[in-house]
Image: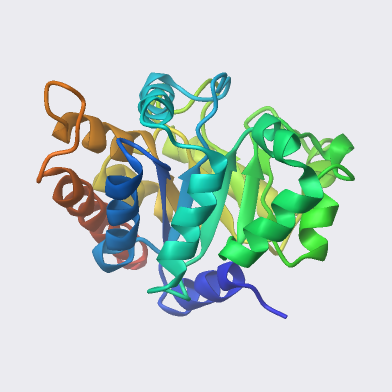
Amino acid sequence: MSSRIDRRFAATRAEGRPALVTFLMSGDPDTETSLAIVKALPAAGADLIELGMPFSDPMADGPSIQLSGQRALRAGQTLKKTLAMVRAFREEDDETPIILMGYYNPIYSWGNESFLDDAREAGVDGLIIVDLPPEADDELCIPAMSRGINFIRLAAPTTDDRRLPAVLANTSGFVYYVSILGVTGSAAPDTTKVAEAVTRIKRHTILPVAVGFGVRTAEQAAAIGRTADGVVVGSALVNAVRDSLDADGRATEQTVPAVSALVAELAAGVRAARAEAAE
């Protein structure tokens, strides 16, 4: 049985374009505003939504996403509230895939089996857990897959052809290619090297390959999207949240529109990607 993620990538492929995957931290700058932003994303052009699970020690995140997590934690965001956000989103949207991205510790503290049951009930479609390697698939990956939750694995520039089969073994939904060495938002990706990496990964899997880390503009999204099946944007969006806040770090009337406007620009970029490549 196909998942929402499978269906969404099939739909964007039928349109001849890459998918736009948007990342935002759940609960940033507060739970109510965060939910309003997430609800606005599909209409703005987001095809899939990654929701960050705030964590106190986010080792793979650059400064922008670290700060967004800190804002969310200060506002009282919890994993329980994040699942409640997904439930609220599902009341109005039963088609857009929702992927939770973050670290294993909060899930482990919840209890793996209980968390997976609750996540599935809430309407979560996939998980990206950046600090769980393939050697630990029995911990969370395989139990998630048994519940119909896609477990999406990261591949990096350092993931060579010897390591790649292990990374891909239990991956489902799509492969997330980290386009740069380092943390999120730390540099702009080299599109030539990204294209080579996507081609190499596709020799090993039929899954879609989405590329993230460092994509900030519609132009970059279009360039990456000429070869990738999806383009992931995170730091630029959490920066849009940050820049819309008042002097005390609270949401303003510009917060939701600021994020929606940037998503619309990025969506135009990915929709132009394949058209440009065909010319």
Residue at 52 percent across and 35 percent down: it is: 179
Q: Is residue 149 left or right of residue 208?
A: right
Q: Give the total of numbered labels.
A: 0
Name above or below for residue 8 compared with residue 223: below
Q: Which quadrant does the C terminus fall into? A: bottom left
Name above or below for residue 265 compared with residue 58: below
Q: Which quadrant does the N terminus fall into? A: bottom right
Q: Can residue 61 be seen from the camera position used here? A: yes
Q: Residue 151, image x and y in percent?
A: 71, 53
Residue at 12 percent across and 21 percent down: it is: 247
Q: Residue 115, image x and y in percent?
A: 71, 50
Q: Is residue 32 left or right of residue 135?
A: left
How is colour applied across the structure in the image?
rainbow
Residue at 57 percent across and 19 percent down: it is: 57
Q: Can residue 227 be seen from the camera position used here? A: no
Q: Residue 5, image x and y in percent?
A: 57, 67
Observer-nearest residue: 26 or 233? 26
Q: Answer with the quarter of the image where residue 206 lies.
A: bottom right
Observer-nearest residue: 168 or 89? 89
Q: Answer with the quarter of the image where residue 191 lies.
A: top left
Q: Is residue 122 left or right of residue 50?
A: right
Residue at 80 percent across and 51 percent down: it is: 113
Q: Residue 193, image x and y in percent?
A: 52, 36
